[in-house]
Image (cartoon, rainbow, N blue to C red):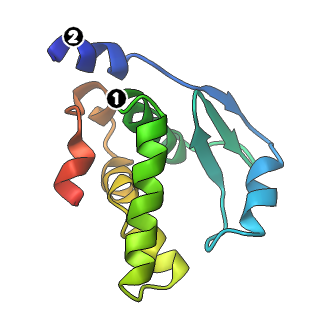
Amino acid sequence: MDLIRVWISKREPWIFENSKIPVWLSKVAPIEINALSFGCFVFCRGTLSKTTRRHEIIHYHQQLEMLFVLQWLLYGYYHLRGLLKGLKGSAAYYQNPFELEAYDNEKKYTYLEKRPLWNWVKYT
């Protein structure tokens, strides 16, 4: 398992700054989207700060360890679960375990190298 963790920790997505994709998605999302990780791409509406870059790479690593599709399905499940609990869209977003892990660790400089596999599970 440690070989997989190390392999994932060294992966970085392709980053596209000054993208219109976050702008367009913000029109239908419950939050104002600054950046998003989808597959092996990160789209940012401006220039990525180091904190936002780390946040989005955490999502990329979550997606890698779950072979992308499973993470997207679970992300949707946790968002829907929050809505069914009566949370508003933005609160459901912030209570999603994938977001909780990313926000909790986005300012930790060495987190990406040391991140345990499946660490988002502790936020469920």
Q: Name the residue under label 2.
A: 3
10 Å crowding of disc 2: few (<14), some (14-19), many (20+): few
Report helix, strand or loop for mark 1: helix
Say which of 78 and 9 sits in front: 78
Q: Is 28 on the left-hand or right-hand side of 116?
A: right
For residue 95, what is the image quadrant? Answer: bottom left
Residue drawn 58% across the image and 27% down it = 40
Asked whether residue 70 appears in the rendered view, the answer is yes
Q: Name the residue under label 1.
A: 65
Q: Position of residue 97 (x, y in %)?
A: 32, 58
Q: Is 98 on the left-hand or right-hand side of 116?
A: right
* On screen, residue 60 above or below 79: above
Q: Where is residue 44 in the image (x, y as percent from the top left)?
A: 70, 45
The total of numbered circles placed on residues is 2
Please state, as top left, top right, bottom left or bottom right, where the N terminus lies in the image.
top left
The span from disc 2 to disc 1 (Cα, nearest Å) is 12 Å
Q: Is 57 on the left-hand or right-hand side of 30?
A: left
Q: Position of residue 94 (x, y in %)?
A: 42, 69
* On screen, residue 78 above or below 106: below
For residue 30, what is the image quadrant? Answer: bottom right
Instruction: Tell me the amino acid under the disc marked 2.
Output: Leu
Instruction: Tell me the amino acid under the disc marked 1.
Output: Glu
Question: Which tag is nearer the camera, tag 2 or tag 1?
Answer: 1
